[in-house]
Image (cartoon, grey):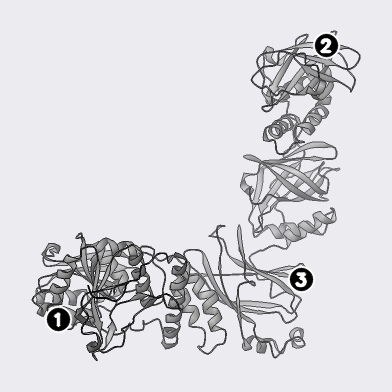
Amino acid sequence: MMMRQATATDERPVRPTGSRTDGAALRFGKGRALFSRVDQETVLVLGSGRTRGHAVSVRADGARSARDGAFVANWALSAPSPSATHCFAALLTQPKSELPISTIDVDDGRMSERFIVAPRQISIEEAASLIAQTAAGETVTAVGRLADQLMAQPTNRDRVSAGLSLIKALQPSDGFIELVGETHDGVLVIMGWSRAFVPGRCQAYILAGATVVADCFVASFARPDIPEGELGFIAVLETGGRVRADTLKGIIYNAGGGWHLTPAHSRVQISAALDIPDHIRSVLLEARATPEAMLRLRSAANGFTGKDTVSSLPLPVRMDVDRVFETDDGDMLISGWLLDPEHHVSSVKLRRPGTEARLDDVWTRLDRLDVSQSFADQAAFRASLDGDDQAHGFVAHARLSGGNLDATPYLELTLREGRRAFLPLTPKRMPARRAALQQLSLFDAANWALPAIVDHQIVPLLSTAACAAPRVETIIDVGVFDETAGVPIVVGSTVGMAEVGPLLALLALDPQTCCAPFVIVVSKPAFQRDLVRLRQLVRFYGLSVRLVCAAAAQDRFDLMAVGAEVVSCETIVTMSGSLVPAGKGWYGALTTVGMAHVGSVISPMLAYDDHSVKWAGSWLSEDGDQMLLDRYAGYPLMAIAALQLTRVDVASLECCIMPREALKDAMRDCGVYLGSKQKACEIGLRINQAGIAAYLLPSIQLLGCDEPTSAEQNGKLAVLAERIDAEILKSRWRSGHQNQTSFDRISA
């Protein structure tokens, strides 16, 4: 119900007299006229003389044609004199705006009279004041006729602005706007009282900083708290979101054959969007208007109020959500169910003030037998439930671009009958990667809809998601860290002490690496847990180590990128914490070849402990689903023993010597993946696209194992993650896969 801030008698409308400006500029002299420029081609001319008929023409500067007399308004002077009993106003067309008008000829068919036009132009407001001073009781009529002509061209902003200035200066205020609010649908709703509003549809000029033209749908209703003869009104203004409720100062409209101004009350109530439907419903039963206007009001009254209205529908339609995730980019991942056995629902939209996205066109349906069982005993559903159709569940990914990000999102169901129902949502904010993993954990691996959910919901969500850049949080040098003592080895470990401890022991026993500078980067939990033990171990071995804590790092490649930030040399050696050297001397051999091929990326061979190949070069795939082919993976090491330094398309970043800037550039805005294998492929493809040469150095071997399953992925998710990551890589890379050069597998 509208809460009144002031009654109709609190602030009665007062007719303004206009701003009076003393001096000759606002006095008519005999045979003289004043002018005000409206736009580049139109001027308003005012003068006084004798009474004239309706067929009056006005010509400027002796023009032969009377076409310049576009319009003339006459009125009797409030204080006539022997030489002048009436005033006139003419809108003249003047194509040459740079030439001032010096004279005008006024002819009514019986006689002609010439007027000299004053050289100084007056403003529209001064013209309005002059009309008010001279027209007295005919002011409204005179201004109305001028405004009709000025505002007949709504695309001409200058003419409309002049017309509005005349109306604001001279028309008496008609009633007040006492309440204004904006619905979630973006329409403006006003309530108040007026004697001039005609129920139905009209065009209104909204005064709110800049003037906005909008369709206005008005209904009237009786109010006991206003004088007799005046009615309350409620109106819907379709502004397309161009006007905010708190900026509205009033509206100007043409109703009942004249122009009217209804200003906002000095204590106007600004209503919240959630309260507007209740205000409309409080007067809707008493309101009177045309069918079109009533339809618009009912639509606004059936708006979102922040409450669940689906559960109260008198139809066999019910809906609920299980989980709603919202990413930092505004993407939303929603899972739930819709029970609509009689197909009453025509559309389902995800909405927020200022933005919306349709869900039922893009969602993936899945069986929800539990929903059918829950409603099987209810009379409204019992007859219509189909035992063969259990696809009541859904998963949907959508993005709400723009709009008010702080407002509550909600689902809007539009029924065939035209009714709407709403379901408010409470999304959990989290990164896209975690939202995808939590959503996938709800499904059984045998669910027939899972492939479609992955392809149409999860992959699009992750493919467009922004990846939070990993960052340095803490740096601790143990001993004297001298990065000039050799090429720094950047070790990235997602595990921490369990991986780094044995690796440091092997590196300390190698004469070449025991003096090399090390940058050991671990995630924040591992850093906090293992810092003391790592310090002790580094001091015991006497190594030169910089310990780095990385925040927002998802995998070992993020950790390596953070490590590259904390050194200044141009070349680095990257190394995964899960690798161990197969023998001594690998560091010296790798750096020697790296210095001979400065600017390139050179990787040693990676092997399993059963003497089979884990990685021995990657080549671009010309066809098929795979982006890269590891042709030697699984071969016994002896099968490729004859290979020497070999050009490949993509090197392995698990261990390589490379330019530091190349790693930083390749990692910038890298995709969101559930694992690290396909992410490594994207980084390698970026390096290839940048034209940086890549090599395999088979004479050096490091031992490693496959990527372990993370703690947040169970066995089912681990299988899905590989497939999802492959699809993400394809969707991100296929469109940008341009001119990558594939090299033959030859020894250098």
Q: Residue at x 63, y 89 (%)?
A: 369
In the displayed structure image, the side of residue 595 where residue 125 appears, left or right = right
Q: Is the C-beta separation of discs 3 and 1 under 8 Å?
A: no
- Name the residue carrying label 1: 506
Find residue 77 and report its image quarter.
top right
Disc marking residue 145: none
Foreground pick, 147 / 591: 591
Q: Earlier in the sequence, mark 1 or mark 2?
A: 2
Q: Is the C-beta separation of discs 1 and 2 under 8 Å?
A: no
In the displayed structure image, the side of residue 249 where residue 12 appears, left or right = right
Answer whether residue 718 is visible to the viewer in this image.
yes
Residue 118 screen position, x and y as percent: 69, 13
- Name the residue carrying label 2: 113
Residue 746 screen position, x and y as percent: 26, 75
Q: Residues within 10 Å of mark 2 (few under 14, many from 20)?
A: few
Indicate which label's residue lies in the foreground, 3 or 2.
Answer: 2
Q: Amino acid at mark 2?
A: Glu
Q: Say which element carries label 2.
A: strand
In the displayed structure image, the side of residue 149 where residue 614 appears, left or right = left
- Name the residue carrying label 3: 416
Residue 337 screen position, x and y as percent: 62, 79
Answer whether residue 430 is visible to the viewer in this image.
no
Q: Amino acid at mark 1?
A: Leu
Q: Amino acid at mark 3?
A: Arg
Q: Earlier in the sequence, mark 3 or mark 1?
A: 3
Q: Say which element carries label 3.
A: loop
